């Protein structure tokens, strides 16, 4: 059975981590995978998480199965975070949330549901998009089409191109959008553009699917949901696949969620029963620990405030690294304009480096970035900055 099977290629993002670990150079730098590092180069457990875990350790009485949709209080708390506690949408009884394993698990559940239950055959993703989107959607049986997004010339958004391509979507197509901190470009829509996009989806009877993995990393936990909330007020139905890997630092707990906004309570209940059926056939029911941590924090005003403060610290450190990176590149005598890096949101900088330059950085300098030229700014520190800039100067 196995002897004729070919070797799979290394994953473009996680494969880099393997290569990085195997690299013996002491000054190597991993700016591949999107993982937050502090100034000491560590990925710490947040204080709010430690405190929630201490509470859980004291109070937990059972490790019995969760329901298919996960921890009971989790859904409402996630909806509060996504849509705002007292918003009309939140109060409308049209939201349904199932806990799911991380962003990838949430997207895969969404994709399986869309194909097998909602008769969707095509999903549109931005060009470029997160390297795993194509694999997830193709594995579920969707046809993946792409819409223009990145204006290479100006390092900005090609919104006209985006609208022109999306004017071709058909009824029942799904349009994948990044809620904020677009991965890999860090370029987001403004509110006027979100509104135009929502109107277009509504007119074409296409449904937006939000990939929302970086809430809090652009401008703030509430601020970053503004696009989603605006779109939700315009289109009749949408879905959100959210992840708490980054904003709670819960990477290896695999915790996220899949949320449906339905046209009516009745249609939502029926659709959600099918989401649960989909989940049952994949992993039966989700693991508890990550969801219990998130629910404990979000339900406790003091812990929630601490968490918001910790997200702010992560956001601000990344922003400082952007500023430092741009100024160090200039100080090194690099005349090429990299100021756009300061305008990008979230963990990533879409540097414009070519595949060859990326490869040289790895081979000659032990600097690991994704083949698309995506650099994880979240992995930059004051101590690795000079080596990084020197490597980039050499390959430019
Ligand atoms: C990334 O884009 O680096 C992260 O979302 C991690 C991953 O799973 O690829």
Image (cartoon, rainbow, N blue to C red):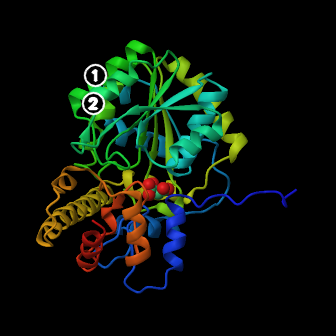
Q: Is residue 183 above or below residue 165?
A: below
As rendered, which of 233 and 111 lies closer to the eye?
111
- Looking at the rendering, which quadrant does residue 279 occupy? top right
Q: Nearer the viewer, mark 2 or mark 1?
A: 2
Q: Which residue: 44% across, 52% down?
A: 295
Q: Position of residue 328 (x, y in %)?
A: 16, 70
Tell whether 197 sits left or right of 271: left
Left/right placement of residue 166 relative to residue 84 reads right
**The C terminus: image quadrant:** bottom left
Most extreme residue toward the right is: 1
Q: Residue at x 39, y 16 (%)?
A: 202
Q: Residue 145 got which mark?
A: none
SS for callout 1: helix
Which of the pair 333/46 is nearer the observer? 333
Identify the secondary structure beneath mark 2: helix
Reading the image, the residue beneath label 2 is 159
Q: In the rendered image of this protein, does residue 20 appear above or below residue 3?
A: below
Q: Residue furthest top?
A: 203
- Residue 87 seen in the figure: no
Badge 2 local density, few (<14 within 10 Å), some, or many (20+)?
A: some
Say which residue label 1 marks. 196
Quadrant of the rendered structure where residue 92 is? Answer: top left
Expressed as whole percent of the image width and height from the top left, the position of residue 139 reads: 64, 41
Q: Disc 2 vs disc 1: Cβ atoms closer than 8 Å?
A: yes
Neighbours of disc 1 within 10 Å: few (<14), some (14-19), many (20+): few
Find residue 264 and report its horizontal and vertical position in percent: 48, 17
**Would you say the beta carbon of the disc 2 residue lies within 8 angstroms of ligand 1?**
no
Query: What's the CA distance linking mark 2 and mark 1?
Result: 10 Å
Viewer-nearest residue: 44 or 146: 146
Pick whichever of labels 2 and 1 is earlier in the sequence.
Answer: 2
> x%, y% of residue 297?
39, 56
| 93 is higher (above) or lower (below) than 80 | above
């Amino acid at each position: 059975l196995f002897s004729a099977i070919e070797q799979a290629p290394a994953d473009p993002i996680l494969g880099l981590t393997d290569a990085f670990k195997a690299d013996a150079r002491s000054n190597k730098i991993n700016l591949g995978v999107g993982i937050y590092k502090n100034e000491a180069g560590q990925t710490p457990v947040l204080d709010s998480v430690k405190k929630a875990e201490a509470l859980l350790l004291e109070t937990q009485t059972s490790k019995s199965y969760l329901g298919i949709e996960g921890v009971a209080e989790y859904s409402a708390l996630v909806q509060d975070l996504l849509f705002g506690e007292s918003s009309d949408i939140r109060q409308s009884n049209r939201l349904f949330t199932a806990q799911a394993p991380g962003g990838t698990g949430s997207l895969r559940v969404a994709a399986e549901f869309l194909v097998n239950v909602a008769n969707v055959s095509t999903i549109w993703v931005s060009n470029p998009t997160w390297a795993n989107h194509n694999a997830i959607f193709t594995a579920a049986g969707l046809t993946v089409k792409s819409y223009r997004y990145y204006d290479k010339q100006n390092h900005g958004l090609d919104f006209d191109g985006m609208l022109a391509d999306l004017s071709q979507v058909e009824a029942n197509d799904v349009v994948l959008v990044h809620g904020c901190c677009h991965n890999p470009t860090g370029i987001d829509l403004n509110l006027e553009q979100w509104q135009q996009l929502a109107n277009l989806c509504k007119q074409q009877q296409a449904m937006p699917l939000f990939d929302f993995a970086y809430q809090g990393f652009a401008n703030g936990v509430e601020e970053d949901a503004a696009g989603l909330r605006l779109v939700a007020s315009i289109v009749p139905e949408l879905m959100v696949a959210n992840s708490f890997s980054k904003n709670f630092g819960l990477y290896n707990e695999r915790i996220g969620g899949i949320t449906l906004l339905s046209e009516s309570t009745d249609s939502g209940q029926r659709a959600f029963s099918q989401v649960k059926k989909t989940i049952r056939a994949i992993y039966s029911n989700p693991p508890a620990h990550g969801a219990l941590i998130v629910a404990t924090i979000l339900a406790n005003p003091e812990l929630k405030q601490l968490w918001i403060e910790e997200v702010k610290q992560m956001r601000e450190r990344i922003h400082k690294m952007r500023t430092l990176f741009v100024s160090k590149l200039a100080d090194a005598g690099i005349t090429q304009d990299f100021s756009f890096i300061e305008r990008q949101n979230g963990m990533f900088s879409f540097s414009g480096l070519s595949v060859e330059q990326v490869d040289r950085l790895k081979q000659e300098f032990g600097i690991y970035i994704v083949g698309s030229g995506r650099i994880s700014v979240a992995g930059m520190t004051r101590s690795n900055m000079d080596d990084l800039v020197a490597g980039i100067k050499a390959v430019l």
